[in-house]
């Protein structure tokens, strides 16, 4: 049976098939979906994505207003207030070390640092300088010790150096802090300052060789935490000491570490 024909003799079936195969024109005008529907759908998808990914602003805000565990603060401050005599010092330190261990293993850096600084303060209160140095060394070497705890301890003990009763005690504390700082980039600035203090003591005692050797151990030109002026001053001090030894070759080598425009700028 012949297919139906239109008035012009064309095959209606073939025309309908061609219309189906050809792409349909995009809807415009009134047929377009209202913007409100698209926005609501997009908002829903954005909400889901936000829930899946961490909110950077919220994380920054939480870190900025981080509040330490009140129980840790209460226990630590309690021992600081309770320890009124030297007889209670060892007991207080033992209790605080137990708190420090719990917080350290839980990776609570602010709480761990707070407890460690409290131990340092107790040793200073009763002027137990040897115990202070020993505690700093032992705490810094504890398993999985946190950087913030070590940094805060060193910075706190650094303020006690001028309070030491004699030079021997002062040197002992400086050397203990330098041992803690050795090889740790996060306390490189404190290490440099401690080293310069120790070198000054050695030079004052007439031991120029030891003073120069101590200063040469540090390559402060690679320190990112030290500002340019202090770094330049440290290198100039290194040059001065080696020149006093008449080591002109080493002095020339050290001089190359200083950029001339940094001196002119300062």
Image (cartoon, rainbow, N blue to C red):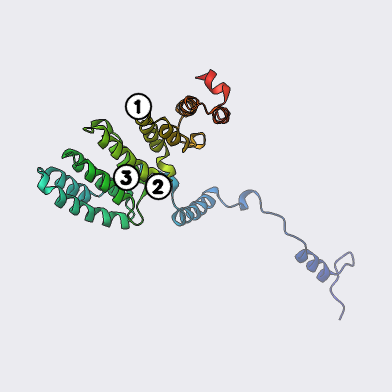
Observer-nearest of 243 and 238 = 243
Report the residue marked by disc 2.
59
Q: Secondary structure at mark 3?
A: loop
**Residue at horizontal 66 percent and vertical 53 percent from the top:** 27
Q: Secondary structure at mark 2?
A: helix
Note whether 187 is above or below 261 in the view shown. below
The extreme bottom residue here reads 1
Q: CA distance from mark 1 to mark 2?
A: 52 Å
The extreme top residue here reads 264
> Would residue 61 be found to the left or right of residue 127 on screen?
right
Q: Earlier in the sequence, mark 3 or mark 1?
A: 3
**Residue at horizontal 64 percent and vertical 48 percent from the top:** 29
Q: CA distance from mark 3 to mark 2?
A: 10 Å
Q: Position of residue 14 (x, y in %)?
A: 83, 69
Q: Quadrant of residue 171?
A: top left
Q: Which mark is residue 78?
A: none
Q: Position of residue 110 (x, y in %)?
A: 31, 46
Q: Position of residue 237 (x, y in %)?
A: 46, 26
Mark in the foreground, 3 or 1: 1
One can see residue 68 in this view:
no
Q: Position of residue 264 (x, y in %)?
A: 54, 18
Report the residue marked by disc 1.
204
Mark in the foreground, 1 or 2: 1
Mark 3 Cα-neighbour bin, 10 Å: few <14, some 14–19, many ≥20: few
Report the residue marked by disc 3.
66
The extreme right residue here reads 9
Q: Secondary structure at mark 1?
A: helix
Check contact, mark 1 vs mark 2: CB within 8 A. no
**Residue at horizontal 26 percent and vertical 32 percent from the top:** 167
């Amino acid at each position: 049976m012949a297919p139906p024909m239109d008035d012009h003799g064309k095959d209606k079936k073939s025309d309908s098939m061609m219309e189906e195969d050809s792409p349909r024109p995009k809807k415009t005008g009134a047929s377009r979906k209202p913007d409100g529907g698209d926005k609501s759908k997009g908002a829903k998808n954005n909400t889901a994505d936000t829930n899946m990914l961490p909110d950077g602003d919220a994380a920054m805000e939480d870190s900025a207003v981080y509040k330490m565990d009140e129980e840790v603060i209460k226990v630590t401050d309690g021992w600081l207030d309770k320890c009124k005599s030297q007889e209670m010092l060892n007991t207080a330190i033992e209790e605080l070390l137990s708190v420090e261990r719990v917080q350290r293993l839980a990776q609570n850096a602010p709480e761990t640092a707070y407890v460690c600084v409290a131990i340092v303060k107790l040793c200073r209160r009763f002027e137990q300088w040897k115990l202070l140095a020993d505690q700093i060394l032992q705490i810094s070497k504890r398993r999985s010790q946190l950087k913030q705890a070590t940094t805060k301890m060193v910075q706190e003990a650094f303020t006690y150096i001028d309070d030491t009763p004699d030079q021997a005690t002062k040197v002992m504390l400086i050397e203990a802090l330098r041992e803690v700082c050795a090889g740790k980039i996060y306390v490189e600035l404190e290490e440099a300052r401690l080293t310069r203090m120790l070198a000054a003591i050695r030079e004052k005692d007439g031991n120029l060789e030891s003073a120069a050797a101590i200063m040469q151990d540090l390559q402060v030109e690679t320190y990112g935490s030290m500002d340019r002026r202090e770094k330049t001053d440290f290198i100039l001090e290194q040059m001065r000491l080696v020149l006093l030894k008449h080591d002109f070759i080493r002095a020339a080598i050290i001089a190359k570490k200083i950029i001339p425009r940094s001196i002119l700028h300062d």
